[in-house]
Image: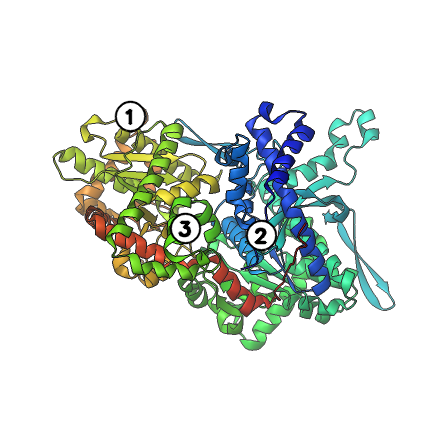
Amino acid sequence: MAKKRTFNKEFFIRSVKYNVRTLFRREIEEASEQQIFQAVGYAVKDAIMDAWIATQKELKKSDPKIVYYMSMEFLMGRALGNNLINLTFYDEVKEALAEIGLDLDVIEDQEPDAALGNGGLGRLAACFLDSLATLGYAAYGCGIRYRYGMFKQQIVDGYQVEVPDMWLKNGNPFELRRPEYAKTVKFGGYVRVENRNGKNHFIQEGYQTVLAIPVDLPIVGYGNNVIDTLRIWDAEAVNSFQLDRFDKGEYEKAVEQENLARNLVEVLYPNDNHMAGKELRLKQQYFFVSASVQAAIERYKKAHSDIRKFYEKATFQLNDTHPTVAVAELMRILIDEEGLEWDEAWEVTTKTCAYTNHTIMAEALEKWPIELFSRLLPRVYQIVEEINRRFVAKIQEKYPNNYEKVKKMAIIMDGQVKMAHLAIAAGYSVNGVAQLHTEILKHQELKDFYEMMPEKFNNKTNGITQRRFLLHGNPLLAKWVTDHVGDEWITDLPKISKLKLYVDDEKAQHEFMNIKYQNKLRLAKYIKEHNGVDVDPRSIFDVQVKRLHEYKRQLMNILHVMYLYNKLKEHPEMDFYPRTFIFGAKAAAGYQRAKLTIKLINSVADVVNNDPAIKGRLKVVFIEDYRVSNAEWIFAAADVSEQISTASKEASGTGNMKFMLNGAVTLGTMDGANVEIVEEVGEENAFIFGMSSDEVIALEKQGGYDPSQLFNTDQDIRHVLMQLINGEFSPQNPELFRELYNSLLIDGGYNRPDPYFILKDFRSYAEAQERVEAAYRDTSGWAKKAMINVACSGKFTSDRTIKEYVDEIWKLDKVTVKLEEN
């Protein structure tokens, strides 16, 4: 680990006071909490700036290979605390602020979560950037500076209501606007071909132009002075206001260009249930990809003359299918602007682009209608057509007279452009994100591609950064771990395995469980303040927090809560260990069934939490607006980690790793990274249930599953399902949950009922929950399980994942940054 930088307390205090005066014309005593946050944020940015400048100088000097990590999402969470931790100044700053009567915890609370992502994909990208900087590799995260992100979730009368997330309302002290590096992005128009000296030149005309303005955010490496950059693109109109049109009374036309630019960066994932939403989403993808590719080429050309060697100094990692248009955009620039021949350009492109697949769900692999794609991106579409023509010829060469292969693998087929196929055809690496996920890709979803090009496929099991999710999110446990095994785990998480020495130690068990209890108190206070519900911190905190999707089976979880409630009502005298079921999830704005599940959870909570007959032994809480900052508290407080997706459907999951690191025990299916978690901790330290992925895949292929059989033979299941339609949890509208009932028994999509096998796995899940209760009653046994989970979490650091990407895919060079001491 690098030498710790010295912290000048007097200078820092002066800097905060100065910022309050110059930013807000106030003395520190009169400043609001938000103003104090801004002042402290700017003071911390000042502390980062020397190292950021030094890093850029070092990149210029040593000219390392750079990874451009392209992602629609970067779910960064709050920056202040994380930056202080990675600068290794956290305790010193806390102390300095306390001297002038300020509380760092209160100040951190003033920072909104950066609304640049939604779920696991974006959080993974954030962890990867943290690890890249901490390990000392040169990286740019490339994305969009969304003004409102996805949405802020409010729960009104039990329903999800989406309101704009105005995270930039007060400005972001950590960002740096760089208009001098603006890029032009073109949409629409047509392509004219001109023959010059026997060579065709393609010229796009009649297009609309948008300016992409880079806004840089520092990504601070832990204790090593390396500051990488998250570059998020803002959009501006080239001619923002056309006065002549305004003067003629054409007010809408006067701001037409400005509106196009605004719409591009307004919201993450516009609702694409309609054509306008689809068009905007494709525009967003091309906008940030085109700007990023242009910037990468410009950076390369400053120091190098031969564009044919671009791949030696740059690699593009495409985080899922969203940035795949980078393949065609790189080809366009190399051919149309740099003058390369097709084969030369293709060689550069196929050595530059690599693709991470994040989904097994075929419907989540993006496809664009040809009409839309060719209208919006006419030149790019021509290039995709040619890539497809050549790729199909290759398929036919390898598999003569096999039209089935062409149908399954072509990039353009059935009137659609298939982005995953483009990424695989052009990428030099295709990786899954957990061992099981990669195997399913190779032998099921992408089987034909794997058979044709097996050398491209590899696995990189996801990871998380322990610096945010233990050091920052759970300071009590972090200190306890350091006291027992030293602090090397902060940058070398496998060192945490030394905790195994203490798992049978009664004193250590007692301390560990007391820390968990303190964290449960902290979360219980949050729940009381935000939900108005009293929860018992001595109850089992059973938690499922993640994006709301049917395959993640939040519905199974709440049906089981209804089942427990029924048991308690029927047998009030039964021996039942108090349970608190905690949910947190956003449903996509257009996803009606997911939104109805949220309503069901809240309706069940209303009934259960207010029924005196069960004496408070069962509580249900839905945490509003689940995001990184409240997630840190939730992970720290959880006893049970619900990872209950239908086996074979979850690519990896990273919430499962965050829970594990914080001493929660997994209750889950053998799906995604759960498989590897169980390998590390041993099956006796997890609660596994349900069908295996092979069983699920076989059942999907062969059919023969009839949920109505279970409905007719299992009275508990029948009782719970009838409660969906008899008004017990919706007395005003007994039909409210009819769609959920129908999805389980009549048609849940894919032309079959219960496509995610909720009822099939229900009994197995209920039995696993009984095992949880029995295990929790044995305090010492539970403490040991939880401690073993922490001790075995070493594999699941994003530092390990990034090291594997670097060694096996990107081949980056390390960067060392030395700072002159002031």
The residue pinned by badge 2 equals 71
Q: Amino acid at mark 3?
A: Lys
Q: Which one is earlier in the sequence, the residue at label 1 or at label 3?
A: 3
Q: CA distance from mark 2 to mark 1?
A: 45 Å
Q: Which mark is residue 658?
A: 3
| Residue under the image location 35 percent in, 27 percent down | 532
Q: Amino acid at mark 1?
A: Pro
The residue closer to the viewer here, 425 or 598, is: 598
Q: Which one is earlier in the sequence, the residue at label 3 or at label 2?
A: 2
Q: CA distance from mark 3 to mark 2?
A: 22 Å
The vertical placement of 336 against 508, above or below, is below
| Neighbours of disc 2 within 10 Å: few (<14), some (14-19), many (20+) | many
The residue closer to the viewer here, 97 or 477, is: 97
Labels 1, 3: front one? 3
The vertical placement of 19 against 542, above or below, is above
Q: Which mark is residue 731?
A: 1
Tell me if I can see residue 400 in this picture: no
